[in-house]
Image (cartoon, grey):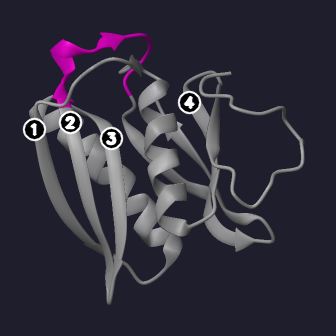
Amino acid sequence: MVGDTSDYGQARRPDESGHRAVAQEDEFRIEAWAASRENCLAEAVAAMVECFADVSGVRPTDVGRVRLAGASDDDLLAALLDEILYRLEEYGQVPVDVEADETDDGLDIRLAVAALTDVRVTGRMPTAVAWEELRIHPGPYGWTCALTVDG
């Protein structure tokens, strides 16, 4: 599994964060977890990127900021991943680091990006985030999210 940082089903500690992605026929199923919602969102982005590119050791060439507003946490997750797909398709930018901060009406996102030509492409490029079974929610050990990305 891409980004698998723990054994499936293993109990998680409250301070742990990580992600995993499972390649399926024409899609990837992504799971991410972290102590906070903002870190969980960043883990989801890292998992999506690892599905198609190796960014280890790649230095960012630009930093961008985006402000996201959403009616729900699920909306914020979908909006963030849609922004990543948009930057990939329109500008050939791949995030190598993501930071999210809560605002009164949503999130302030900092994206450190590199050019697609500067990373090693390892798989199919993602094309869309599926709304079916997309979720992010708090639990006893922090936040978790799950979603499917078409590739």
Q: Which mark is residue 113?
A: 2
Residue 101: percent from the left, percent from the top? 35, 70
- Mark 3 or 4: in front is 3
Q: Which mark is residue 62?
A: 1
Measure the alpha-carbon separation of dots 3 and 2.
Answer: 7 Å
Quadrant where the N terminus sits is top right
Q: Which residues lie in the magenta part?
A: 114-125
**Sequence order check, earlier mark of 3 and 4:** 4
Quarter where residue 68 is shown: bottom left
Residue 31: percent from the left, percent from the top? 65, 45
User: Which secondary structure lies at badge 1?
Assistant: strand
**Sequence order check, earlier mark of 4 and 2:** 4
Q: Is residue 123 above or below residue 8?
A: above
User: Which secondary structure lies at badge 4?
Assistant: strand
Residue visible at 68% across and 72% down? Answer: 138
Q: Is residue 33 magenta?
A: no
Quarter where residue 122 is shown: top left
Residue visible at 46% across and 64% down? Answer: 38
Per the image, the residue denoted by label 4 is: 27
Residue 64: percent from the left, percent from the top? 13, 51
Residue 21: percent from the left, percent from the top? 62, 32
Q: Dot 1, how many residues are within 10 Å of its Cα: few (below 14), some (14-19), or many (20+)?
A: few
Per the image, the residue denoted by label 3 is: 97
User: Which secondary structure lies at badge 2?
Assistant: strand
> Residue flagged by tag 4: what amino acid is it?
Glu
**Sequence order check, earlier mark of 1 and 3:** 1
Q: Which mark is residue 51?
A: none
